[in-house]
Image (cartoon, rainbow, N blue to C red):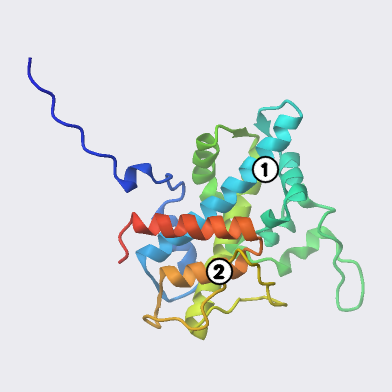
Amino acid sequence: MTAQPAQPERSGRETAPPMPFEASLVKAVFRDVTPLHVSRSAVWAAASVTRTVLTELIDGARRAAAAEARRKLIPGDLLSALDRNVELEVGHTWYDHSPTFRGLTGVLYDSEGVLVPSRQRGGSRRPSAVAGAHRFEAGVKRLLRGRGATAVPAMVRDLDGIASVFLTDLARDAAMVVREGGGGRSGAVAPVPFLKDSRPAPAARRGDARTIGRDDVLAAATTRLFGGNLRQRALTEAREATQNHPAG
């Protein structure tokens, strides 16, 4: 009987969690917000952080659905997940756009103190993130399947939107880190409180001033994700993801 060839040992690439968002898509998001070059490791880090955030949202929604003996996720499950875990409150620009969050984001007033109807609030949104949300549908569906979950179309649409807005904000923050030469936060109105289990962004960066690198994305994620557990997990998984992909 002919001996079978020995099977190769499993590598880190095989055991790493699959990336639901294609590198070309993530790179396109960076191109929407900055002319800076983006390294491969930065692309994979951004994709990984976004995956971690979406995974947490899906798992929180699954727990909410399970409490009502349902298998298919609905937008109400997303709201329940956010109510139970403040760390998951990301992608706020999408909240003003989606019917799921209507009535939960407060009312808006113009400069004269007059209430602004919801249909007129489009001027305050970022069109690139909202209009491009449909690009994430395939990745969101892959991520749902990977978590053993199914969702109604409206839920998929909300996850699309949150992924698009979050990744756009992350890319914009990473570009700001490069321009400022450190770990500053773009658009922040107050400093993020220091958490003992978190790693603060570096005071100064090293590297090409025209290229967004992995550490720039990690610095952006450190300030974009204010929750201790979610932030630490996102940073850890992003570092692991970039060890399994070229850094060029």
- Going from N to C along the chain, the mark reached first, 2 or 1, is 1
Q: Which quadrant does the N terminus fall into? A: top left
Image location of residue 66, percent across then percent down: 70, 30
Q: How far across and down, in percent of the image, does residue 110 sit?
A: 86, 74
Q: Residues within 10 Å of mark 1 (few under 14, many from 20)?
A: many
Q: Amino acid at mark 2?
A: Arg
Q: Residue 47: tell me if it is visible.
A: no
> Is 115 left, or right, of 6 in this rendering?
right
Task: Identify which residue is drawn at 79% across, 63% down.
Answer: 120
Q: Which mark is residue 199?
A: 2
The three-letter code of the residue at mark 1 reads Gly
Task: Decide: is 237 above or below 198.
Answer: above
Picture quarter containing residue 130?
A: bottom right
**Above or below for 85 versus 61:** below
10 Å neighbourhood of mark 2: few (<14), some, or many (≥20)?
some
At horizontal 33% and vertical 42% (from top left) the residue drawn is 14
Q: Is residue 209 visible?
A: yes
Q: Look at the numbered disc 1 and give the secondary structure of its residue.
A: helix
The residue wearing badge 1 is 60
Residue at coordinates 43% horizontally, 60% vertically from top-left?
Answer: 239
